[in-house]
Amino acid sequence: MSEAEQRLAEVRDAVTRAAVTAGRQPAAVNLIAVSKMHPAEAIRLLLTAGQRDFGENRVQEASAKWPELRADYPDIRLHLIGQLQSNKAAEAVALFDAIHSVDRPSLIAALAKAMNETGKRPDCFVQANLEGAEGKGGCAPEDLAATLAAARDAGVPVIGLMCVPPEGLEPAPWFALLAKLADDHGLAHLSMGMSGDYESAVRIGATHVRVGTALFGAR
């Protein structure tokens, strides 16, 4: 077994254990390999091991790496997990299968325009800034209802919520808050949990976990 295969097997096993502990089906958890700042050669090792969902932070970096990889592996699903500028919305819609960082009316309008022009409608998550930190992406919880309404009105398909817990704090309460907000708004999907806390996220209900270091190793 290669190192990439071993890492992938270990993370998948941990996801399975966490899901079973919580009385969930492991298949309900989508493992996203966060490939930002990793070269195509490292990505190919995980592709060979069977991984198909990958996450990138920047449109420009993804557009340089993924067209060639997708030519060889057409069943790849690519997720944009970083902040998205409205002027990059059309590129993001063309390149990604899911966008996890929808957080403001101007971006919703830009995404809707791109989706209407292309007919391509990636799954979208609204990012919540749960602690209200200035300068951090995401909409405040009190703005969530209005943001979701704007997305619905614009025809942007929001399937769930996403969060990044505050650094240095226990993440479980933030995951639980996101799960409650999603339930309150009738959303079935939760994008939460990274290499250091994805097992906790799975136990609390994550449907998408974004794992980088545990799969690729330290950069």
Image (cartoon, helix red, strand yellow):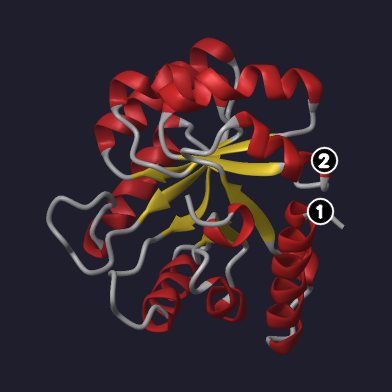
Q: Is residue 101 left or right of residue 62?
A: left
Q: Nearer the viewer, residue 191 or 189?
A: 191
- Write the residue at 37% across / 62% down: 164
Q: Residue furthest top?
A: 117
Q: Is residue 199 visible?
A: yes
Q: Nearer the viewer, residue 188 or 16?
A: 16
* Image quadrant where one finds the N terminus: bottom right
- Write the residue at 61% across / 50% down: 33
Is residue 139 depicted above or below 65 in this figure? below
Instruction: Residue under label 1, please give it.
Output: 2
- Write the residue at 28% across / 76% down: 168
Neighbor class of circle 2 (other Cα within 10 Å; few <14, some 14-19, many 20+) is: few
Please give the label number shown on residue 48: 2
Q: Is residue 112 visible?
A: no
Q: Amino acid at mark 1?
A: Ser
Is residue 216 depicted above or below 113 in this figure? below
Task: Count the labels in the image.
Answer: 2
Q: Nearer the viewer, mark 1 or mark 2?
A: 1
Are the residues at dot 1 and dot 2 in contact (C-beta closer than 8 Å)? yes
For mark 1, give the secondary structure. loop
